[in-house]
Image (tube, grey):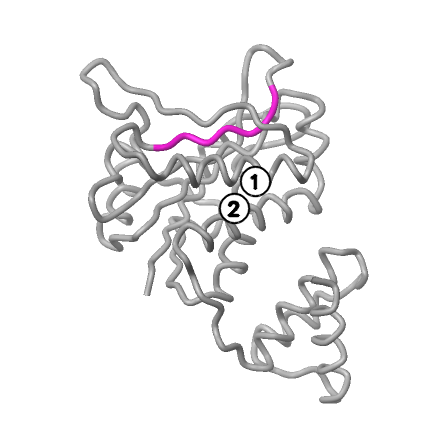
Amino acid sequence: MSKVLIDIGHGGSDPGAQANGLVEKVINLKVGLLLKDYLLGFECDVKLTRETDITLTADQRVAIAKAYNPDLCISVHHNAAEDIKARGSEVIHAHYDDYDDKLALDIMQRLAVAGMPKRRAFTKLNSIGSDWYYMIRRIWDNDTDAIITEGGFVTNAADAALLKTDAFLTVEAQAIAYSIVDYLKLRLKKLTEEQQLYIAIAKLKDRGIMNSPAHWLENAKAGKLIRGEFASQLIIKFAKELE
């Protein structure tokens, strides 16, 4: 079974980029948690470097990755620049391979469909010819691919307008998830009815069809079917028909 590590950037005393009313550590966490939920519908094992607003050092993040030894480590970030005109998604991949750049380009293409323009997929080397970014340099090896996603610029007004909406952050997580599924050739799990129901309710919530599904989601996630088996089946069927 493939193993995916989601490294959620910044956190705790490290807020990351801040502009236009956005704090990077907050939106990183939202996207990372959604990404985990989507991947759990497939045959893979998923781990996060953080699930709450905590501070992690570079060494702590690397230690988590080394202990877990994933097939893919994806670091979730959002960008900032002095030039407020700079906008769009970026994905950084390892310099010394010729395959994870395909994953980078696929993520950017999916985000572009959702309204976040493509800026660039790139690599960067330090003065001794190693990858510049430690979450690639210290993670990437023959067993683990590593990339960094930058879902948009908080310093750009147009990007920030998208990043302020739960709808776009959901689409961003979906874009990354579906790219990972294709990249690792993940297969759908045979889901229990409770799992199908959880996914269906989440999908209807994302589409704005269900306004207040929080307690339904919690019941479904806890394995408690919504009262009335027929109602549960209708929800699952309706969500599938939207695909």
- Cα distance, mark 1 to mark 2? 18 Å
Position of 65 with respect to 114 (left or right) is left
Q: Residue 176: which numbered mark, if any? A: 2
Q: Mark 1 points at which residue?
A: 26
Residue at (37, 51) in percent of width and height: 5
Please tell me how crowded label 1 is: few (under 14), some (14-19), or many (20+) other residues with Cα within 10 Å. Answer: some
Q: Quadrant of the N terminus?
A: bottom left
Mark 1 / mark 2, whichever is N-terminal = 1
Q: Which of 183 and 169 is in front in this view?
A: 183
Q: Quadrant of the C terminus?
A: bottom right
- For label 2, the SS is helix
* Magenta portion: prevailing SS class: strand
Identity, as a three-letter code, of the amino acid under mark 1 = Val
Q: Which residue lies furthest to the bottom in this view?
A: 229
Residue at (73, 60) in percent of width and height: 205
Does residue 90 belong to the magenta stretch? yes
Vertical position of residue 223 compared to residue 151: above or below: below
